[in-house]
Image (cartoon, grey):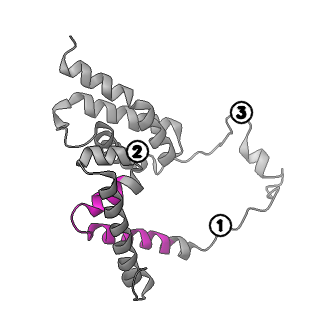
Amino acid sequence: MPNADSEFSQRVQALQPVLLKYARLQLRNPAWAEDAVSETMLAALEKPQAFAGNSQLKTWLIGILKHKLIDQIRRNSRELSTTATREDGEDLDELLFTADGHWRESPHDWGNPEDALRQVDFMKVLELCVEKLPGQQGRLFMMREWLELESDEICKELAITPTNLWVMLHRARLRLRECLQLNWFGTTGAAT
């Protein structure tokens, strides 16, 4: 009969592909993603007692991974590649520039930096609106929309029915809409 640590280790190892997929989507750098996942797995396996079972193991590991991803981004934020190459080894400078240093093809418009800043500000307002949601609505919304957990996982973890989940998500969305109308769009009006 396997001991609890061995069983826990197997469960953590089984989730490694899911964690790696999530990390690659966030970092867009396979090496950094693998490092973050390795650090997550190591942290989980070094302190299995930290997993109290109050959530799904996957949710707990993603929580650890998010912190590791932030650490990885901070660590590598100053890393610059002076000689960029594609995966097939071809020099990107030769693909993008002529011998005299001019663009082979004009770059696309990157848009307005102020628009990007507004998007960052919008996310801050959205986060504050989610924090203001009553009871479990904020947690449910984040589990479903941000962590992309399946409905059955959420229902099982929180011991609620699918109908209750959908009602609470509907109410959360209505409250978020109202909060965003007031705090971002600057309009008032009944949410429909």
Residue 103 percent location from the top left of the image: 79, 58
Residue 138 percent location from the top left of the image: 29, 62
Q: How packed is label 2: few (under 14 Cα within 10 Å), some, or many (20 or more)?
A: some
Is residue 127 visible in the rendered structure shown here?
A: no
- Give amino acid for label 3: Asp
Q: Is residue 189 above or below residue 86?
A: below
| Of the image marks 1 and 3, the number of the one nearer the N terminus | 3
Q: Are marks 3 and 2 in contact (CB under 8 Å)?
A: no
Residue at coordinates 35% horizontally, 78% vertically from top-left?
Answer: 179
Residue indicated by mark 1: 110
Residue 18, by quadrant, is: top left
Residue indicated by mark 2: 72
Tell me, yes or no, whether the highlighted magenta stretch contains residue 124.
yes
Q: Main secondary structure of the magenta part?
A: helix
Q: Is residue 158 above or below residue 52?
A: below
Tell me, yes or no, whether the highlighted magenta stretch contains residue 64.
no
Q: Are marks 2 and 1 in contact (CB under 8 Å)?
A: no
The residue closer to the viewer here, 191 or 133, is 191
Residue indicated by mark 3: 88
Q: Which element type, helix, strand or loop, lies under badge 1?
A: loop
Q: How packed is label 3: few (under 14 Cα within 10 Å), some, or many (20 or more)?
A: few
Quadrant for the C terminus, please. Answer: bottom left
Q: How packed is label 1: few (under 14 Cα within 10 Å), some, or many (20 or more)?
A: few
Mark 3–mark 2 distance (CA, rounded to whole Å): 26 Å
Is residue 86 visible in the rendered structure shown here?
A: yes
Q: Which element type, helix, strand or loop, lies under badge 3?
A: loop
- Give amino acid for label 1: Trp
- Give amino acid for label 2: Gln
| Of the image marks 2 and 1, the number of the one nearer the N terminus | 2
The residue closer to the viewer here, 25 or 39, is 25
Where are the magenta residues, as a range? 117-143
The residue closer to the viewer here, 84 or 188, is 188
